[in-house]
Amino acid sequence: MCIRDSVRAKYIDEWQVRRSEIAKYWCDKFKELPLRCLSDTLDPHAHQKFVMYLDDRNRLQSHLKEHGIDSKVHYEYVLGDLPTGKSLTKPDLLGTSVMLSRGVLSLPMYPELTDTEVSYILDKVRLFFDK
């Protein structure tokens, strides 16, 4: 292990606590919005990403970008969308994965986010739904 990694290792638990605090805060605040918080868990090891699902993911992502907030789409394609998987597509088996691939969005999630930044992101997500 290099020196940099050993220094980082000292902060892993603290960083996980901070990520969990952010996830819990957003999940609590997002309950009133038409989205589903997929990061609503007490498992602190599950907060490397803050993942949510909504029908209008692409428009929210554009809205956030306009306000300087980076967001990510993970696993945009399911196996059935790829040329090698065309023969494997079966709606009964891939229906959920297709739905999720079309609506999942991840917000910034890192322990260095300040409370002000966390609130700013929340406010901009709310603004999107207030339009």
Image (tube, helix red, strand yellow):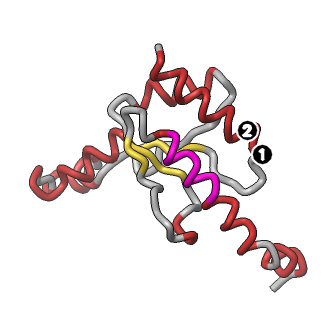
Q: Residue at coordinates 59% horizontally, 61% vertically from top-left?
A: 48
Quadrant of the image containing the N terminus: bottom right
The magenta stretch spans which residues?
21-29
Residue at the limit of the structure toward the bottom, as seen here: 1
Q: Position of residue 40 (x, y in %)?
A: 45, 57
Instruction: Using the numbered discs, state the Cα–Cα distance from disc 2 to disc 1 in whole angstroms.
Output: 5 Å
State the predominant SS element of the stretch in magenta: helix
Label 2, residues with CA under 10 Å away: few <14, some 14-19, many ≥20: few
Q: Secondary structure at mark 1?
A: loop
Q: Nearer the viewer, residue 11 or 3?
A: 11
Residue drawn at 43 percent across, 29 percent down: 58
- Relative vertical location of residue 45 with respect to residue 41 in this rendering, above or below: below
Seen in the picture, residue 108 relative to 126 is either above or below; the reply is below
- Which structural element holds mark 2? helix
Name the residue that disc number 1 marks: 114
Residue 70: image location, x then y, percent: 63, 36
Image quadrant in which you'd find residue 99: top left
Q: Residue farthest to the top?
A: 131
Where residue 113 appears, as percent x and y from the top left, is: 74, 48
Residue 65 inside the magenta-drawn segment: no
Residue 47 position in % (x across, y down): 56, 62
Which quarter of the picture shows residue 111? bottom right
The amino acid beneath tag 1 is: Thr
Q: Are marks 2 and 1 in contact (CB under 8 Å)?
A: yes
Residue 47 bears which disc, if any?
none
Q: Which residue is mark 2?
A: 117
Q: What amino acid type is highlighted by mark number 2?
A: Glu
Question: Image height check: is 72 above or below 24?
Answer: above
What residue is shown at x 37% (from left), y 36% (from top)? 54
